[in-house]
Amino acid sequence: MKRIAVLASGRGTNLEAILEAVERGDIFGEVALVISDQEQAQALQRAERRGVKALFMAPGNNGGREQYDRAIVEQLKEDRIDLVALAGFMRLLSPYFVNAFSMQIMNIHPSLLPAFPGLDGVEQALAYGVKVTGCTVHFVDEGLDTGPIILQEAVPVIQQDSVETLHQRIHASEHRLYPTAIDLFCREKLKVEGRRCMIID
Ligand code: GAR
C-alpha cells in the first residue's frame, strides 16, 4: 500500500474526498500525512478529525522557496511518502522539490489544461467565454501546471453561471477524478512517456 501525503492551503474539500475514498477502500493506499502552509486551513482540521497526522509548516519570511521546500521534502522522507497530492496548495514548487519526488507529485487544477493555468482557472474560463471547461489531474514538473496529464473531465458552462456556481460543479467533478487518479498511481497503473501518461492493465 502506498503512503500518500496531501498538501493543501485552503478548504480541503479535495482532501476530504480523498480521505473518504481511502475509507471506502477506493484508493489502494493510506493518507499518512497532511501538510498546510496556512495555520488556519480547514484542511488541517479535516485531517485531524479523521485521525490523520496534520502539520502546519510556516513558509517564513527569509530563506526563500527552496529552504521551505527542503523542510517539506525532509518531512515527506521521514514519513516514507510515496505520493504527494497537491490539493489546492497555492505555492509553486521549487525544482529541488520536483526532482526529489519526480513523477510522484500530482496536482488537481480547475480547468482543462493547457487552457487557463495558474491562479483563478475558473474565473479565467468564465471570462474567456468557453462553453466547456473542467478539471485536470496532472503530474507536477518544474513549470506552472505543465506536467503530463493523467485524467481530465469536462464540465459544461451554462449561461447563468457565476464563478461560484461553476466552481461548485467543477469541485464535484474533482472529487471523483482525483481519487481515481490517486488509486491508479497506487496500483502502479500509470506509465509516463514524454508528455504522455498512459494507463496500463
Ligand atoms: C480546487 O478547485 C483546485 O482545483 C484548485 O483549488 C481548489 C481547492 O479546493 N487548485 C488550483 O487552482 C491550483 N492552481 P479545496 O481546498 O476545496 O480542495
Image (cartoon, helix red, strand yellow):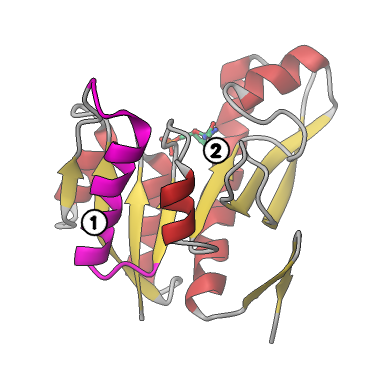
Residue 125 on image: x %, y %: 74, 22
Q: Residue furthest bottom?
A: 201
Label disc, if present, on residue 110 of the rendered structure: none
The single residue placed furthest to the front in the displayed view is: 63
- The secondary element bearing badge 1 is classed as helix
Where is residue 118? Give x, y as percent. Answer: 61, 28
Q: Quadrant of the N terminus?
A: bottom left
Q: Quadrant of the C terminus?
A: bottom right
Proximity of marks 2 and 1: CB atoms separated by less than 8 Å: no
The image shows residue 54, relative to residue 183, as above or below, that is: above
Using the image, determine if residue 76 lies above or below residue 46.
below
Query: How far across and how far down the image is residue 116, in percent?
Result: 72, 28
Chief secondary structure of the magenta span?
Answer: helix
Q: State which tag comes first along the sequence, 2 or 1.
A: 1
Query: Dot 1 surroundings within 10 Å: few (below 14), some, or many (20 or more)?
Result: few
Q: Is residue 198 left or right of residue 139?
A: right
Please state which amino acid type lies under the numbered disc 1. Glu
Give me the disc on residue 171.
2
Part of the protein shown in magenta: 61-82
Q: For the image shown, how many numbered marks are present on the structure?
A: 2
Three-letter amino acid code at the position of disc 2:
His
Task: Quickly name the residue at label 1.
Answer: 74
Q: Is residue 187 above or below residue 163?
A: below
Task: Please report the residue visible at 77 percent of the width from the left and 33 percent of the height from the top.
Answer: 115
Q: Residue at x 61, y 51 (%)?
A: 137
- Whether residue 140 appears in this view of the structure is yes
- Side of 80 relative to 86 (left or right): left
- In this picture, residue 185 sits left or right of residue 16: right
Q: Residue at x 75, y 12 (%)?
A: 127
Mark 2 CB near ligand 1 (8 Å cut): yes
Residue 136 pos. (x, y %): 66, 46
- Measured Cα–Cα span from mark 2 to mark 1: 31 Å
